[in-house]
Amino acid sequence: MDGSSADTAVRIRGLRKVYGGIAAVDGIDLDIRRGETFALLGPNGAGKSTTVEILEGYRSRTAGEVEVLGVDPARGGRDWKSRIGIVLQTGGETGLLTVREVLHHFAGLYPNPRRIDDVIAAVGLEAKANVRVAKLSGGQQRRVDVALGIVGRPELLFLDEPTTGFDPEARQQFWELIRSLKAEGTTILLTTHYLDEAARLADRAGVIAGGRLLDVGGIQEIGGAEARVPVVRWNDAEGRPHEVRTHEPGRVVASIVSALGGEPRALEVIRPTLEDVYLGLVRGAEAATATPDPPSGTAIATPAPTPDAEEPAA
Amino acid sequence: MSTNVTTQGASRIGVETRMYFRAPDTLFFTFLFPFVMLAIFSAAFSASGEAGPPGAEISVAALYLPAMLASGIFLSGVQNLAIDIALEKSNGTLKRLGGTPLSPIAYFAGKIGQVFVTGTLQASLLILAGWLVLGIELPTEPEKWVTFAWVFVLGLTTCALIGIALSALPRSGKSAAAVVIPIGLILQFISGVYLQWDMLPDWLQNIASVFPLKWIAQGMRSVFLPDGWEALEQNESWNLPGVAIALLVWLVLGLVLSRITFRWIRRDA
């Protein structure tokens, strides 16, 4: 039997959610190990939020098995809720209370909360602790949302688009906070549109589109080796752009140099980022649904080649 | 292990009360409104002299004190909670609380506790203002104050539960005030709060008798108006057993409707 609840934080088998005859989630299997940070990626309307809301206990499911910390979320009681933390996309309006007041109140709902001063410091709101939440900027209010999600010392933290509206410095601070939670052993399920954020924070990622998981894997492996083949770009003597995908970019660059007899213009060696891999997967899935009979060998799509891709100019 | 319901409930009452007094709109339209109306009615009708049956004439201010106490009970319970909870439903507060180990019982204890803290303060200040500022004579018989106590507690509890049930009606937080306030205004006009009860036609009195505000106002008049005024009531009696029965029926109705309609979030099918 796979996924004993001792080392599995989230276990999903055959999850389906149908709204009015349309499957928003169409057969998902997924395991998230305890202590790992997992990024769930996908375009809007892909079934990402529906899946997460089922895991959080907010939504019912049409079919399938779900276990979160060993409990079916549809039956998760108060004891179960005290073990999870949820940072929602739209936080509630607690604006009339100060940061410290609202944290004090929420801390009191949990059996073993973090120290309020520690949480305020962790989200970098020391200077705003006694200011009403309504008077904070959007990014600062978002940090309050995050603080409320972690004050109960959750074993599993759900983060839904946590850094929307953060400035770059706040985002760096937030990443540090997530790394420290991770170091304490917190399991984190992150949904985000910022692929660089997923690449920095997550151990593994899953890409979801059309209600199905297209691929799941380590941040360095997802999408398959083919999707990560480096691309060499340069302009020839006439200024025409060239591009080639190769496992041996050094050798290709050397051959270009010798063929041109000099330094190629606008030379770039690009290793596909998680964003490139993600876009390749999602576009591949869109193309597969658009054409009923996809060409063989493109089950895992690669970044779309540019029209003038060709062999190195000899 | 989650923290116990009593601790959570006490904590909720604290934050609910703090938020109530920090929201300028509830502070005015719920807490201060009866004071404003008492002042306006007393000033507007002071020229028309005293009112009431021969031998039991009182000032207009004295006539409006029980009416405004009833109004305060209604606003603190029904209007306050119906708008408040509808807003919390639409702005994500309830969803967020629903994801914490907060017990729904503690949540409602917080709401009802807030209604009692603010409602008691409001009624005390109204009575004090009537006595000290408007020179209204207060009843001295202990049994009148016993009646006041049970009408107040029963009325406020019933109104709080109706408010919780009514919060399911507005389709969005924005429309909450627009849906709830007119209902309250109409009831206050037909229940002997803004208009003197015996000036209303029988058919309107009969309609008002279906709703709880009429009975709260009647109970309050029985406490603060002198003997002789009962002749102006329906069946020429204060009918306190009727007050108790009508409020208990609405209390049970409010409780059942609250249980049926309340959700942490709008659940899908």
Image (cartoon, coloured by chain):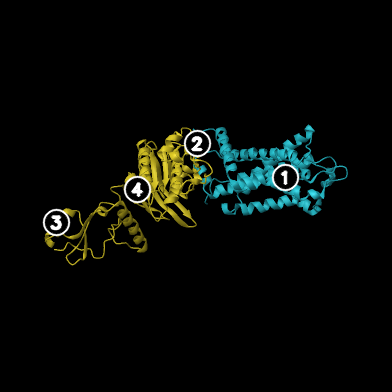
Chain colours: A yellow, B cyan
Disc sitting over residue A198 in the figure: 4
Q: Residues within 10 Å of mark 2 (few under 14, many from 20)?
A: some
Q: Are marks 3 and 4 on the same chain?
A: yes
Q: What amino acid type is highlighted by mark number 4?
A: Ala
At x 50% / y 36%, what residue is drawn? Answer: A104
* Front tag of 3 and 1: 1
Element on which disc 1 rests: helix
Q: Are marks 1 and 2 on the same chain?
A: no
Q: What amino acid type is highlighted by mark number 3?
A: Ala
Q: What amino acid type is highlighted by mark number 2?
A: His
Q: Does residue B257 appear anywhere in the picture? A: no
Q: Is residue B14 above or below residue A140?
A: above
Q: Earlier in the sequence, mark 3 or mark 4?
A: 4
**Looking at the figure, which quarter contains the N terminus of chain A?**
top left
**Looking at the figure, which quarter contains the C terminus of chain A?**
bottom left
Q: Which residue is mark 3?
A: A254
